[in-house]
Structures are given as C-alpha cells and as structure tokens.
Image (cartoon, grey):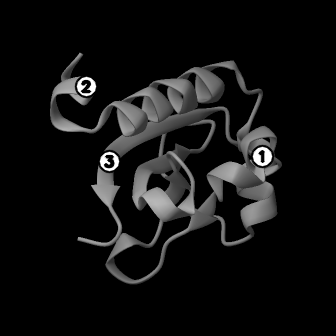
Amino acid sequence: MKAKKELSEEIAEGLHSLINILENADNLRDIFKMSIYYLHPLQGKRKGQYALDIAGRRAGYRLIIIPLDPDGNPWKEKDVNIVYKSTQVILAWEVTNHYD
C-alpha cells in the first residue's frame, strides 16, 4: 500500500475509505451529499478538475478527480449539478496537500 508509506495513517485510511465510497456511489451527487468530503470544482489551471477532502478540511489532504462524460471524456458541461448527477466514471488524478 503505497498510500500508507507516503501519507500518515489517518490520511491513508481516509483515502482508502473515500475510494471505496466512490466505487460504490451511483454518481457524484451521492458524494456531494456527504458534506465531510466537500466535493467542489476547481478553478484556474485546474479547471475541469474537482477536489474531495480526504480526512476533513483541517487535514488539508484532498483527492483530485476528473469526472468523465458518458463517452469517457472530461466534461465540458459548466453546470455542476448536471456533472454530479450524470457522472458515473471518474479519473482519480492525484492526492495533494492543499496547504503545501
């Protein structure tokens, strides 16, 4: 488990839990309803990417994802409600420490 080697135990366990939740969700709307993960779109050079807090906002670590449309491409849709409701596949992009 690479996550446990490079991240604290709390963050590694939170990441594995979040991945399990993502795998079992019907769409991103299910995740958005879980306010602990604070799913939100990013801006600037990260436009088209979304962040999820791994172990709460204070921990600072987040999973960056790219939601994919039904054709397997990153969404061009601007309305996050449509993206959340219609996304069934994501690309897990990276884990970052928001405060580094």
> What's the distance in space between the residues labelled 1 and 3, CA to CA?
19 Å
Q: Earlier in the sequence, mark 2 or mark 3?
A: 2
Residue that carries the numbered disc 2 in the rendered image: 4
Give the amino acid type for the residue marked by disc 2 in the picture: Lys
Asked whether 18 or 6 is in front, the reply is 6
Report the residue marked by disc 1. Answer: 34
**Viewer-proximal residue, 54 or 91?**
54
x and y percentages locating residue 5 in the rendered image: 16, 27
Residue found 69% across the figure and 51% down from its top: 36
Disc on the earlier residue, 1 or 3? 1
**Label 1 – label 2 distance at C-alpha:** 24 Å
Instruction: Give the percent coordinates (x, y) of residue 4.
Output: 25, 25
Image height check: is 49 above or below 21?
below
Name the quarter where the C terminus is drawn: bottom left
Q: Name the disc covering residue 95, or none.
A: 3
* Residue ID at (34%, 45%): 93
